[in-house]
Image (tube, grey):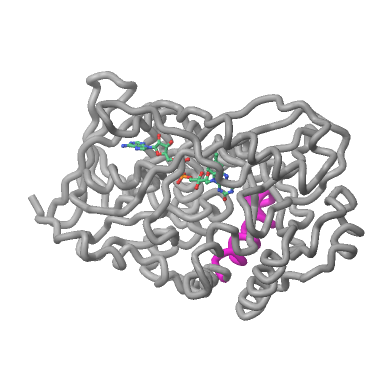
């Protein structure tokens, strides 16, 4: 039986970036991906690098907004990682960090921005609060109807089709065995190690390996993969929608979000405007349950609402034809915070998932590899400890 230090489950951005960092720290790693590398959320998303507190973290009342603001140091670490990523990977992945706006269109949203500004400054994040005139001076494409905006100079976007494969290539160069079409279907704890059974190429060809540690980086499937080890993690799959317009001459160099509504947009280097912000799509069902193997179905009304918000905020967008809409599946943790760390009572079983997983993946990868190899991290990650869901679990017995 082959032996590795670490089995990484999932070949999305979190898995590939973590495998790279683990190998950089000297670990022998097998990364198993049941489909193609980057074929799920990491290749389907909006590519926003948003470090300001998002709408979804501010819509549940002051107490929870305050709790969620404790994520800001992680956002700042992620911003540093993205700023150096192309140099680290040795190739371009279309990282553009020319700043991001969170725009208020109503008085309530102005109040929200002021609260957000105060919380972010508590954690040393130098967001700027701008009047409508100041914002429009930097971003003349914004509507004359805006009331105010928060601006963070390091926000931006990157190309989801490029980032994960670049990490996978970098991981391979460091000696990682990256195995696509390889499903992890069984996990057993032995006295000091884990045994994993892998199904290769959707055939009956099976490979068993032994590893010291497991990293569950299976995104929306993280709950299912945890069950393979007898662990319960509250990860709920959520189906989301994206739209893209035809290409236009460059006019929107920033990431643009709305303070009180589901909207994010940016113009990519080819000139198209990518519009999203978390509008749901609909799961197909299989035997009465969401079928995660199939693309969710677009809800037309949601696309229309999303596009109306975009055109209201940046009127030039209204003139552009819609080219394509698509859907993707993301894993959301019940309390909205990331899951990052070792699962208590399950020594050697680690998880990294949840939150704004594209923005935060480079930070997750750096931190989880540090924790797995050295047993500690420079950055406090106790807020994300899977142990907060310890009540769902029991100890695993060695076989
Ligand atoms: C439409 C959409 C827009 C989004 N926009 C943004 C955004 O703008 N900014 C942002 O920060 N985040 C965004 N997100 C969220 C972000 O895409 C995800 O959080 C992130 O990509 C998660 O990466 P991951 O590697 O954890 O998961 P994934 O990319 O989903 O990878 C998990 C992988 O695990 C594999 N897997 C599952 N089970 C097994 C198994 N048993 N064996 C082997 N492999 C297995 C799956 O096949 C999958 O490839 C968006 C998500 C969606 C869907």
Q: As drawn, which residue projects farthest toward the top?
A: 203
Question: Can residue 191 be seen by looking at this rendering?
Answer: yes
- Residue at position x 77%, y 57% from top? 99
Residue 77 among magenta residues: yes
Residue 194: x and y, percent? 21, 49
* Foreground pick, 356 / 12: 356
Residue 315: x and y, percent? 83, 42
* Foreground pick, 251 / 5: 251
- Residue at position x 53%, y 29% from top? 298
Q: Look at the image and give the residue range highlighted in magenta.
A: 73-88
Which quadrant would the N terminus be assigned to in this image?
top left
Residue 102 among magenta residues: no
Residue 190: x and y, percent? 14, 51
In the depicted structure, whether residue 329 falls above or below residue 28: above
- Residue at position x 43%, y 43% from top? 238
In the depicted structure, whether residue 190 falls above or below residue 30: below
| Image label count | 0
Question: Can residue 92 be seen by looking at this rendering?
Answer: no
Question: Which quadrant would residue 244 be assigned to in this image?
Answer: top right
Q: Is residue 379 left or right of residue 191?
A: right
- Residue at position x 45%, y 30% from top? 296
Q: Is residue 268 left or right of residue 226?
A: right
In the depicted structure, whether residue 104 falls above or below residue 292: below
Residue 25: x and y, percent? 46, 57
Name the dominant secondary structure of the magenta segment. Answer: helix
């Amino acid at each position: 039986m082959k032996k590795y230090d670490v089995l990484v489950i999932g070949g999305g951005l979190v898995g590939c970036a973590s495998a790279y960092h683990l190998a950089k720290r000297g670990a022998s790693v097998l990364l198993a991906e049941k489909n193609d590398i980057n074929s799920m959320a990491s290749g389907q998303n909006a590519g926003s690098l948003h470090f300001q507190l998002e709408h979804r973290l501010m819509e549940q009342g002051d107490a929870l907004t305050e709790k969620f603001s404790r994520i800001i140091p992680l956002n700042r670490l992620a911003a540093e990682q993205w700023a150096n990523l192309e140099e680290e990977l040795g190739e371009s992945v279309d990282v553009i960090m020319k700043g991001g706006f969170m725009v208020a269109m109503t008085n309530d949203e102005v109040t929200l921005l002021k609260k957000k500004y105060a919380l972010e400054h508590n954690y040393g994040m130098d967001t700027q609060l701008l009047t409508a005139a100041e914002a429009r001076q930097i971003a003349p494409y914004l509507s004359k109807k805006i009331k105010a905006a928060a601006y963070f100079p390091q926000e931006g976007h990157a190309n989801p089709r490029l980032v994960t494969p670049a990490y996978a290539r970098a991981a391979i160069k460091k000696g990682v065995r990256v195995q696509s079409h390889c499903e992890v279907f069984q996990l057993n704890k032995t006295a000091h190690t884990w045994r994993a059974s892998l199904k290769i190429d959707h055939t009956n060809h099976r490979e068993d390996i032994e590893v010291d540690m497991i990293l569950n980086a299976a995104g929306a499937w993280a709950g299912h993969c945890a069950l393979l080890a007898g662990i319960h993690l509250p990860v709920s799959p959520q189906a989301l929608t994206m739209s893209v317009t035809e290409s236009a001459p460059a006019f929107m160099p920033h990431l643009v979000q709305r303070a009180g509504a589901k909207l994010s947009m940016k113009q990519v280097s080819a000139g198209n405007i990518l519009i999203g912000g978390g509008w749901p799509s609909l799961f197909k069902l299989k035997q009465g349950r969401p079928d995660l193997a199939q693309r969710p179905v677009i809800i037309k009304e949601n696309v229309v609402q999303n596009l109306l918000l975009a055109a209201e905020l940046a009127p030039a967008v209204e003139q552009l034809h819609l080219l394509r809409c698509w859907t993707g599946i993301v894993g959301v943790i019940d309390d909205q915070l990331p899951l990052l760390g070792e699962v208590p009572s399950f020594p050697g079983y680690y998880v990294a998932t949840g939150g704004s997983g594209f923005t935060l993946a480079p930070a997750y990868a750096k931190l989880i590899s540090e924790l797995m190899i050295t047993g500690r991290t420079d950055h406090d990650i106790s807020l994300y400890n899977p142990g907060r869901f310890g009540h769902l679990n029991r100890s695993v017995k060695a076989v």
